[in-house]
Image (cartoon, grey):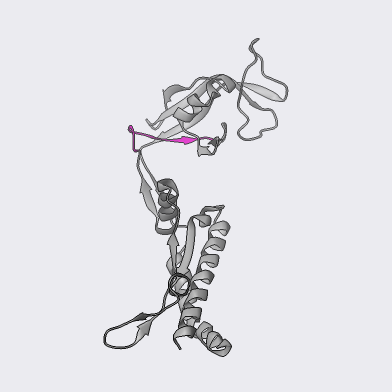
Amino acid sequence: MERGALIATDQGGKIALRNIRTAMQGAGLGRLGNGLGAQSDLSETGQVHRYAGGGFSASGVVFVRSGSPRTRGTIDAYTLGAEIQPVRGRWLWIPTDEIPRLAGRRKMTPDLYTKNGFEQKIGPLVRVRSVNGYPLLVVKNASVSLAGKKRSARALTKSGRARKGQVEKEFIVAFVGIPRTARAARVDVIALVQAVQRDLPTLYAQAMGRN
């Protein structure tokens, strides 16, 4: 019975991990699920937990294995929901579809825009005020795809003309400033784990059959 419980809970943890990763991919979160892991009493010690008054327990768990604060925070936000506020300064700067979404492997920010040479590739950022009073960072005298392709902004040539396949624009909005934003949970981890818990009797019966 102890061995059967160890096997069933070990399998349950692995199934829950697989289901959560699949749900994250389906929710458009890419490989975020790779920041999760699974372990169990079977994989860690190979023994059940015994209670002083008699009886035992066996468990399998899904946990956040990534040590990256950014990854851990993102997992929290998309599984629990979160309100995101600026850490430095008053505004969160959201890149628009006119400029690249990433600078290297990091999400584009005004600082990364400058550090990664986009002032030369597209143009320097100029702060203006939107009609709602929030700030915008715009690039004046740039160009975008003639076909309407996203993230296609480029600087004009030295002669002040748009490059081939581009059309000149008086200005493009590169970043929108907002004071805060809410991020809704996309994956219900509790529901996925509870579904595996309901299947534990079947997993246990299968394990007993093998033993």
Q: Would you say residue 91 sits in the magenta stretch?
A: yes
Pinpoint residue 105: horizontal percent, then vertical percent.
Answer: 54, 39
Residue placed most toward the observer, 148 or 84: 84
Q: Which residues are magenta?
A: 87-96
| Residue 183 visible somewhere in the drawing | no
Residue placed most toward the observer, 38 or 130: 38
Side of 159 relative to 106 (left or right): right
* Rendered residue at 42%/75% (across/down): 59
* Rendered residue at 56%/52% (across/down): 30
* Rendered residue at 48%/22% (across/down): 125
Side of 152 relative to 199 (left or right): right
Quadrant of the rendering where the C terminus is positioned: bottom right
In the rendered view, tell whether residue 57 sits above or below residue 102: below
Pinpoint residue 44: horizontal percent, then vertical percent.
Answer: 44, 70
Q: Would you say residue 5 sits in the magenta stretch?
A: no
Pinpoint residue 55: horizontal percent, then vertical percent.
Answer: 34, 87
Residue placed most toward the observer, 142 or 84: 84
Which residue in the rendered view is the most extreme toward the right? Answer: 164
* Rendered residue at 34%/34% (across/down): 88
Report the magenta stretch's main SS: loop
